[in-house]
Image (cartoon, rainbow, N blue to C red):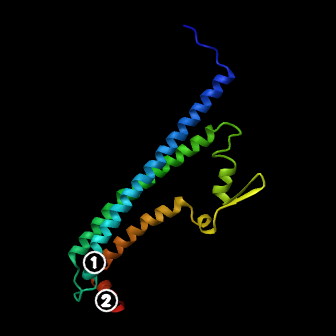
Amino acid sequence: MTHPPHTASHHAVAAVERYKMLMDLMKYHQTIIWGSFTAFALTHSIFLGVFARFVMDGTLSASDKPHWGVVGAALMGLIFWLPWYVTYQRSNYYFIFRLEQAKRAEPEGLNVLKGSMERLTEYGEVFIDETRYKLPLMVGLLKTRHAIPMFINGFFAIYAFFLLSQIPFVKAWLRQTF
């Protein structure tokens, strides 16, 4: 059995197909990131909403004793937080890995992921055909890869605060202060 000769056009077609496949994988991982983020954010928001009134009653009550319902709910929130954080981090690293693979496989001159896009992402500004594209100030200051973990860790901070608020001396201080 003879194999067809490998020509430059055959290699070019194979390179474009590899690039398309990597772009599809990158989009898939991005979908996973946002789907799981949305599901966890909704779950945590509902959980906090249901238990917020309960927490306020337990935290600011006249007793210095811990309110075990608040302690249990805060621990449950921290336990729910962990898979959210891990799922986001893992999915984000997979996305970044596929993005880097796609950048390396991008055909010369295409400039979709490399070149201008890299400069816009890194520096917040790029010129294309003498037209300036600049990210708004706040968008440039806080990149998505930092904002989402901050949001997720904000829930950790809320749960940790509720848990710590049940330590008797912290509870007494909160009652005096508020």
Residue at numbered disc 2: 175
Left or right, 85 with reference to 24: left
Q: Amino acid at mark 1?
A: Arg
Helix, strand or loop under label 2: helix
Q: Nearer the viewer, residue 131 or 123?
A: 131
Q: Are marks 1 and 2 in contact (CB under 8 Å)?
A: no
Quick one: label 2, few (<14), some, or many (20+) residues within 10 Å?
some
Quick one: label 1, few (<14), some, or many (20+) residues within 10 Å?
few
In x, y percent, where is residue 36?
Answer: 39, 53
Q: Would you identify the image quadrant in which residue 110 lies?
A: top right
> Residue at 66% across / 56% down in the picture?
120
Left or right, 39 with reference to 132: left
Q: Amino acid at mark 2?
A: Arg
For marks 1 and 2, the one nearer the N-term is 1
Quadrant of the rendering where the N terminus is positioned: top right
Q: Distance of mark 1 from mark 2, alpha carbons?
A: 16 Å
Residue at numbered disc 1: 53
Vertical placement of 58 versus 111: above or below?
below
In x, y percent, where is residue 82?
Answer: 36, 59
In x, y percent, where is residue 16?
Answer: 61, 32
> Residue at 47% across / 62% down in the picture?
149
